[in-house]
Image (spheres, grey):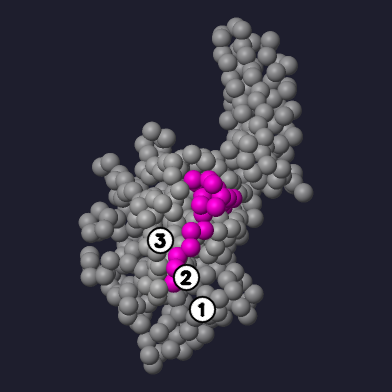
Amino acid sequence: MLYPSAPLAPYWSKFRNGQFEQTTITDENVFVQNGMLHIKPTLQDAKLIETNNVIDLRKQGICSSTLWTDCVAVTNTTNGTIVNPVKSGRINTKKGATIKYGRVEVTASLPAGDWLWPAIWMLPVKDTYGVWPQSGEIDIVESRGNNYTYAQGGNNIISSALHWGPNTANDAWWRTNVKRNALHTTFSKTFHTFGLEWSEKYLFTYIDTRLLQVLYTNFNQPLWARGNFPLSDSNGTRLIDPWSKTGNFATPFDQEFYLILNVAVGGTNGWFQDGASGKPWVDQSPTAKKDFWDSQKSWQPTWKDNGQMVVKSVKMWQQHGYNGCWRISLSLQSGHIGIDVWVWWHRCDRVKKLISWYWSFAYITTDLLMDISSILVDSGSGLKHNIRVLHSFIAKLHPSPGKSIS
């Protein structure tokens, strides 16, 4: 299979979290090794930090933000400000695979290392109901790379959350946020499947099996009512309900979303609590990034063995009946040994784009279907016609390796 890097989003920070990494578009931080995708943070070039410098992604033509502060970073040795002290990767499926209701499964091992912040999450394709968090955010899994002794929970704990609210100050994520502990291990020592099942009536995340759920949210009442938001913000401006007019209790989680995988580092939004577990910077300090850089002897060694997210597979399913998708089914039956195998395939009006992304990035369900059909062929000659139908159907959806999809 082919596993080329997906498009990257070079940002200096995300949603004003004050993260310390510069996300890059090079294989230093995102690469494929042994058939698996790696997202690995690395140190910034020391020369860019130790001397006065300006990094301007706009001049390089690679900044994917329209905000000046997301595209330009400065080192000023006089006042102690520095460019981003580390580099990392962030990839997304916005141009390749989006779903409105359905299922997502990412099989990955999370990084181990102090102050690493891995995340598998989703954002809306369009800000239908307004800027973040009015149009929602789905966090399938977030964690911290610190070990189990970390006060807020290290790589032995993951959390899932939904972000929704009329503005950033009234983000009701804490009403839809749940943590889950690993059992006698960590989420860095082995691979786990982090999943999302999402419909018009409910949304839940899970680990390895749908029976081990993390966050479960029923869409059985308007989210505006569930949020119990104040009448106005701190400035006295009246807060407006952007969702209830749709009549859909799932709003804003009723639009197309795309998947994001990234490993952030540090931050100044409280994800790493001040004054706890030897945190080497203070969120409100103007020299927070430099304080972090200066303490690298304490944290960089912890990244050495497993300081990266390793992704084995990514799968996304669009729920039948939404987003221009329909479903067909094939039934293969063996009268000799009594086997019934049902194969469902969801197809979208954007099927070529979706399949191209599957083929080039992570996992192809053809492998599973071929295995099933091989077993049935071996079971009796009476299945040859059905097998030919199945293979013919698969061939139309999945070209052989090396063929392109225009």
Q: Residue at x 38, y 90 (%)?
A: 79
Q: Residue 350 or 395: which is nearer the viewer?
A: 350
SS under mark 1: helix
Q: CA distance from mark 3 to mark 2?
A: 19 Å
SS under mark 2: loop
Q: Are marks 1 and 2 in contact (CB under 8 Å)?
A: yes
Q: Which residue is outermost to the right?
A: 406
Residue type at mark 1: give it. Thr
Q: Which residue is mark 2?
A: 13
Residue type at mark 2: give it. Ser
Q: Position of residue 153 (x, y in %)?
A: 27, 55
Instruction: Examine the residues drawn in magenta and state their main secondary structure.
Output: loop
- Report the span colored magenta: 237-261
Residue type at mark 3: give it. Asp
Q: Residue at x 61, y 78 (%)?
A: 58
Q: Which residue is mark 3?
A: 171
